[in-house]
Amino acid sequence: MSDPTTGTTIIDLLADAPADIAALRRRRPEAVDNAEASFRALLEPADAAGFPQAWRYAVAAFVAGVTGQPAALAFYRDLLADEAEGAEADLPGALPGAVDTAIARGASTGPYSGGGFVEFGAVPGLDPRLAAGLDFAHLLTFHPKDASPAAIGHLQEAGWGDDAIVSLAQLVAFLAFQLRVAHGVRVLAGGGAGSPASPGAGRAPGVADPGWTPGPRTLVPDVVAPARFVEHSLGWKPWLAALPKEEFTDVHREALVQPQRIDSEYFRLLARDPAALRARTLTDLDIFYNTDGGLGRAEREFAATVVSRLNGCEYCASVHQARSKEEGGDAAVISRLLDEGVAADMGSPLWEALRDAAVALTATPVEFSWRHVEGLRDAGLDDLAVLDAINASAFFNWANRLMLTLGAPDVPKRFR
């Protein structure tokens, strides 16, 4: 949906980004282009079978609303209203109003863990299948650490197909990225001194156990969960069947970007939505491996580790702590982060500022403010490096939500 005459992208639009900041974003051109491609793949796919386009807009408006992002809420609600008006024969006219009711019910703060499941089945005007999708979206948005095979079973029981479940998870996780980048860019451009007003005072009322159960198609693998954040490699097992290798088409293979990923159950699972997988992968590679100026690789991986530690994703933290160390990051500091959490002493003004920015971008509603930009600048970063810190932190709010809600980490036998 970028404007071909101006090059304005959706993130530029949501951030009200001035020309100089929009141009700075284009120093990471694949990340910019593929954030747009992710929007097209997840919000306006060529084939929306199993997950209607209006429902995609409804989920996006819901996530923007419950996380206190007014510009994004207006943008996605307008798309939803236009879709509703243009499809009266198929779409209940009450859907935009039902989403507003769901937002008021679900506005919350996070990340948290340990219960607090919010359900939307009683909201008038919501199809029961979409209501289950919003249940899942709330879980992914505020407490993905509480995900389990039962959450997948809840969607399957409501009538969601496995391909559509992957698309739903990708959509909510992508929004976690898109909305955080837009907020960070707005602040970097001087467009806001702080975060938007909190949409709710603490957690929304919920239940500790919604009574969901795994379904006949849900995988419940035998795993040994890590007892703490670890510095060795971990395995990962899905709660949905990965796409079999023999069913891969050229489109699926192209979506992998790196052919060896066909041996990974995680990437074969995401290949159920190949357009979304390809766009996500290319976004990832540019954010973390484009070293044309900006933030160092060790620092980008450090930001990913901070976000993963705060969100509770042991798998992502194990991978990216190692990469930060390989790129020259302070091993003692990274180990301390894993052991003590995000409040640990980071050992230097730069890593303290990076930690503070990553934590603020991960909070929901987003707490990233002008003081975080000033802290990064005071630590010696230019604005391209600040943008890299925003991108890296935002991206791992995408990655963590997929790893945490589609499967579970598994300690390899050699480390048990």
Image: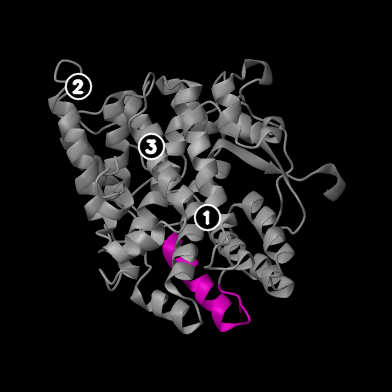
Q: Quadrant of the N terminus?
A: top left
Q: Is the stretch drawn in magenta largely helix, strand or loop?
A: helix
Mark positioned earlier in the residue sequence (1 or 3): 3
**Residue 287: assigned label:** 1
Residue 295 percent location from the top left of the image: 54, 68
Mark positioned earlier in the residue sequence (2 or 1): 2
Q: Are marks 2 and 1 in contact (CB under 8 Å)?
A: no
Label 2's element?
Answer: loop
Residue 338 percent location from the top left of the image: 66, 65
Mark 1: few/some/many CA within 10 Å (<14, 14-19, 20+): many
**Residue 45: assigned label:** none
Mark positioned earlier in the residue sequence (2 or 3): 2
Q: Are marks 2 and 3 in contact (CB under 8 Å)?
A: no
Q: Nearer the viewer, residue 339 or 375?
A: 375
Mark 3: few/some/many CA within 10 Å (<14, 14-19, 20+): many
Q: Is residue 344 magenta?
A: yes
Task: Give the number of the mark in front: 2 or 1.
Answer: 1
According to the picture, the residue beneath numbered tag 3 turns out to be: 135
Q: Nearer the viewer, residue 23 or 155?
A: 23
Q: Nearer the viewer, residue 284 or 250?
A: 250
Label 1's element?
Answer: helix
- Visible in this render: residue 259? yes
Magenta stretch in the rendered image: 343-363
According to the picture, the residue beneath numbered tag 2 turns out to be: 91
